[in-house]
Amino acid sequence: MLRRATPQHRSRRLTFARLTTVAILAITATFATRSAQADESENVLNLKYEFFRDRNRAWNHTPAFALRMALSRAWRLGWEQEFDLVSGASRRLGQGNVGQSAGADAVTGASKVETRFSESPSLTYSHAGTVASGSVYISRERDYTSVSPAGSFAFDFNRRNTTVGGSYAEYFDAFRPTGAFKGMGGDKRIRSLGVEGAQILTPLTLVGLTANWIRSWGYLGHPYNPPIDRDGALMTEAVPDRKTAGALAAQIVQGYHLGNLLGSLNLDCRAYRDDWDLESGTVDLKVSQHFSESGYLRLRTRFYAQSGAAFAKDVYLGTEPFRTGDIRLYPFTSILVGAKISAAFPEDWDDSVLLPDRWDLKFDYTIRDTRGDKLDSQPGEARSLRYQLYGPDEYYAQGVIMAGLTFNL
Amino acid sequence: MTRVPISGLRKPLPCPRAPGVAATGLLGLAVVLAWLGCAPVPQKDREFLSDPIMQRQDDALESGLEAHDFPRREGSAGGGSGSGGGCGC
């Protein structure tokens, strides 16, 4: 996010990338023999390439892969790797062209292009309807690191019609801003607990319920989003140092037949609330339809709305105990529409592991209600325009395209 | 960090979040009722449930990318898992 990498930093990154590659190859070689004992379809390599672009002409290139290898009939090794190349990372929603013409962001002095690396090795045990998994997620940016051990379990009963499970994750995050905001970060801990249940209702109906409890403490702010007072002067952000949140989600997957081809409706609704008084609701609907035995088309729409945090205001006096300019803590709505197509390559390609077995292509377009703030201004009061916002009648928009290949090894 | 109770601060700005919250409640209630009234589906009748389009979640890598990247791109605080793992900036 921040200033251009020094040669030492670049060298450190290259060393890490090399070590990661060597580790992947070593793991692959070590378990290749044993994995041959298991079903071939259990060994899968999934490649994705995601490209994001928004109305401000900020972009992300995100190549990623997931490797899953069977060690035996019960044990499975997984590795997910993501590289994130981001332009204008610190440029705010709604402020077009900031940072575009200069070498660094006009507000934070951050570099125009930032890289992030993350990986997540995992080990999974699965036998007779019982699944247990452990993983570690590691993410690094120049100004931010995160390490998260996590575990989950699930088991089936009721003649394998019912599944219940739980999950646990602990995040150890460190935010170390440099440049104009140096010294304003800190450490953050997040503890996440989840319980989940799923039930088969009919040969074409599946339902599920998920509940999550998330507690965060430490430095929870974001210094790159300083609030602005009514005169346009920047103030230091101040937010509470703890937060507790809960979310409840309900889902139904209903299949149907169009002629001989299977289709499905997948409705997922989620409600969220935290003790900063921020509430949100999500309705996510996917309609999928096979057009061949192995190919399908999926259409998706998602509606999201959230309130603001209790202390988020459009105009600050400067005497408030908490104040923020972080656009994520203000109310808005968004709508996503998208499509995905997925199909298998010809079967005679299966003879070689060098050729993919499936491909998929996805496009999502999102419009966010990020209109200019005038909600809190009183008659005669100067209006504080947060630099994240567009004008009163304009919207923020973004698009994501993702291409994928799947190899059955 | 200053420790000041959040209660008593100005109430949140209004927002049309009710549809999502209400839909979650209604769907959750329907799920529980259906759960209580269902009979087990035999293994031989479950072939369609293993189809990729009948899964509750997309493939793990796609879901993981969206879970991490979409909330920060959208600029939401309650839309994802609410967890850490990145700067979000």
Image (tube, coloured by chain):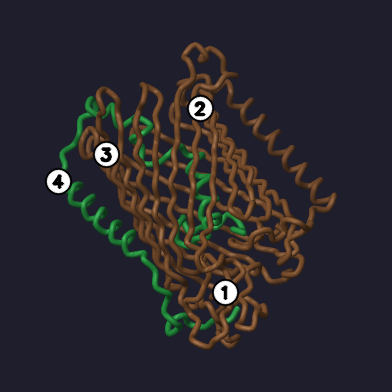
Chain colours: A brown, B green
Which amino acid, mark 2? Answer: Trp
Give the mark nearest the N terminus, 1 or 3.
3
Residue neighbourhood size for the residue with mark 4, other residues' Cα within 10 Å, grouped as few (<14), some (14–19), many (≥20): few
Which amino acid, mark 4? Answer: Gly
Q: Residue A169 appears at what percent x and percent y?
A: 49, 54
Provide the residue designation for mark 2. A359
Nearer to us of marks 2 and 4 is 2
Q: Nearer the viewer, residue A363 or A30?
A: A363
For this view, does B58 lie left or right of residue A3?
Answer: left
Question: Is label 1 on the same chain as label 3?
Answer: yes
Residue neighbourhood size for the residue with mark 1, other residues' Cα within 10 Å, grouped as few (<14), some (14–19), many (≥20): many
SS at circle 4: loop
Q: Does the image show residue A43?
A: yes
Provide the residue designation for mark 3. A254
Q: Which mark is residue A324?
A: 1
Q: Quadrant of the C terminus of chain B?
A: bottom right
Give the mark nearest the N terminus, 1 or 2.
1
